[in-house]
Amino acid sequence: MNLQEKLIILADSAKYDASCSSSGSTRNIKSKGLGNTFFSGICHSFAADGRCISLLKILMTNCCIFDCKYCLNRRSNNIKRAIFTPEEICQITINFYRRNYIEGLFLSSGIVQNPDYTMNLLIETISLLRNKYHFNGYIHAKAIPGASLYLVKKLGYLVDRMSANIELPTDKGLKLLAPNKDSKKVTNIMHYVKENRSAKFVSSGQSTQMIIGASQESDYDIMSKSSNLYQNYKLKRVFYSAYIPVNHDKNLPLIKTPPLVRENRLYQADWLLRYYHFKVEDILSSDNPNFNLLIDPKADWALRHLDEFPKDINHCSYEELLKVPGIGLKGAKRIISSRQYFTVTFKDLQKMGIVLKRAKYFITCNGQYLMTKDLWNADFITKNLVLEEQKHTTDTKKEQLALFL
Amino acid sequence: MKKSNYIYIYPNDFTSLITLLGELAKSKILPLNIQDKNYIPGLFDKVIELDLSPLNTPAIISHIDKNILNTLFYLYLSNHEYKELIMYYFFLYSLKFKDKVFFHRDINIVDKALKIVKYVQNENHKLKGFTRFKELKRHILYAEITCENNIIFLLSNHFKKRLKNEFWIIKDVKRNILSIYDKKDFYLVDANNCNLKEIILSEEEQEIEDLWKSFYKTIGIKERQNDRCRLNFMPKKYWKYILEVSDEI
């Protein structure tokens, strides 16, 4: 098997991991060696699925002793298997990085022999890359659940980001679909990384991933889990990956297309949790456990709390501005800093990057409302917001939405 | 402020332009336009070139707040037809509002200026990712780029840090400028003055490019194909020099 065939097999097996960010780290170039990192991250290319490519995302090997039902690389699947040597990974990474194809390496692996053995393979490779090739770019490595903590420590000093995937939000789901996995082993690693994080140890933090739509969990279960992870383990990101049917199993749902709209809603809600001062209970509850696929979670919340609107742009607080659909973080900051110097009008809002098409239903400027008063009802606003969103959705998403309309 | 019917001409560099802006502000002139030396006047244009040599450029520049000077520099690099005039008005407002000028989106010209700056910065950031080097004989890295704004200086600063221990050359094809880095610093030169005809690729170059192309094809998930999203992030105008998509054009 030549290098190209190997690369194709091991990139193909790695592609389902959603994380590809290269941000949060500031490594400066050393006198000897190659590369640095850029705090806000850099996207080098975009794949045909529209996702950013910033890291060389590959598996060390796609051989695996586990038999997770949703995974392409499960033991019982009859697929081509390959393994890279550490030297091969270094060669590809260096050659790609010098030509500015990539921002760094994302190395993960199927589990061979046992977690410690696999972890050692990753450490050997990355240490070769850092110490022999003096590679100083971004490295994101997967921690293998169940590996000894001294190995997690060793790996942590070599990489910018580490992640261990939680995969499914509840133990019930794990038992059903990933019988060899144990969420305790994942959280052990997260706890260790959280306790020891520093500028030299996993400097850009840790992340994780959940698969969406392979098991029965509701959005409420998923968001509660995320919120819990952010609070208890100080995660930088939780990624959501719409389940893509690669295997057949009686425990897997029968779907043809991945639930992309749902995935999108989860990301939107995730941002609300992290930056917009929302709590899970604000947007979902056990009575209302799933997102409205037709409308984004913030607008959905606003429509359920219409009595708190409209807000006056020139008087309400920063926190209140953040809760208005169509106003983002930057927009809210701009409004706050500008209104010290002049009275903001609708025209100014447009210049500040506020999406008036959405915000206009929920705001007033100096007591003035853009719509007529008799249109102030949830039905009318919902219809218009849904129509507005439809214009911006892609055809595949439209197909999925059509099922609900 | 008095309106002038003259088009003011400046030597083609940033510091001269700033000196001229300082001088115009001091004499309270609102010029019809400001243009660089390559400007070809129309039949009825009245042009004037001030003698800037007696003016103390470092003193003028040191009086300008760092953030404002930075903004002026980004404007200077933009491809906007009236960038000099926008710079001048932005400069005037910065004299009035000091560093608070950045909050004054209610003033059209300030809003316009800040949007242009954003555009230049965004393009620079995009090219940090989209630039593709090829390895030539003797381990020299060579990249061709195409960009709307004149960002090769900004881009070179980025690669000077990242590829510190490599020899590299970046060519802005549209403006015919080369940036040449010798492991110490980079130099911007007119490509006409350089003989780069004999570009010979290193032996393994083709192999690495093929590896990258097959990686690119593999990493996209078929079930999630989304051309519109890809085009949004990676507009077609850059594709010619992005090797993994250049054959899709």
Image (tube, coloured by chain):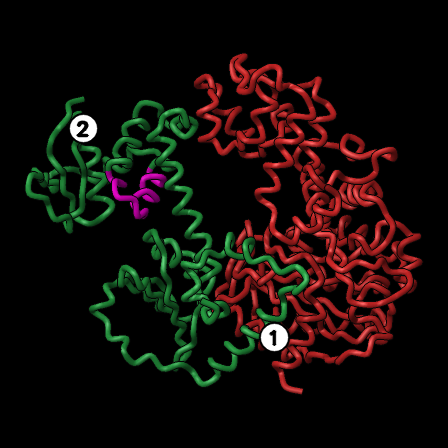
| Residue B249 colored in magenta in the image | no
User: What colour is chain B?
Assistant: green
| A25 lies above or below A250 | above
Q: x, y (%) of residue A9? A: 69, 76
Q: Residue at x 34, y 51 (%)?
A: B149
Name the subunit of mark 1.
A
Instruction: Please indicate whether residue A125 sits to the left or right of residue A46 in the image.
Output: right
Q: x, y (%) of residue B207? A: 51, 82
| B19 lies above or below A181 | above
In magenta, the rendered stretch is B69-84
Report the front residue among B62 and A216.
Answer: A216
Total numbered labels placed on residues in the image: 2
Instruction: Please indicate whether residue A312 sits to the left or right of residue A211 in the image.
Output: left
Q: x, y (%) of residue A104? A: 58, 64
- The image quadrant where one finds the C terminus of chain B is bottom left
Q: Nearer the viewer, mark 1 or mark 2?
A: 2
Q: x, y (%) of residue B80? A: 29, 44
Instruction: Please indicate whether residue B198 sits to the left or right of residue A125 in the image.
Output: left
Disc ID at residue A90: 1
Question: For the residues tagged 1 and 2, is the chain the same?
Answer: no
Q: The residue under label 1 is which amino acid type? A: Cys
Report the front residue among B31 and A371.
Answer: A371
Please give the residue where the numbered disc 2 appears in the rendered image.
B30
- The image quadrant where one finds the N terminus of chain B is top left
Label 1 and label 2: CA atoms lie apart by 60 Å
Q: The residue under label 2 is which amino acid type? A: Leu
User: What colour is chain A?
Assistant: red
Disc 1 secondary structure class: helix
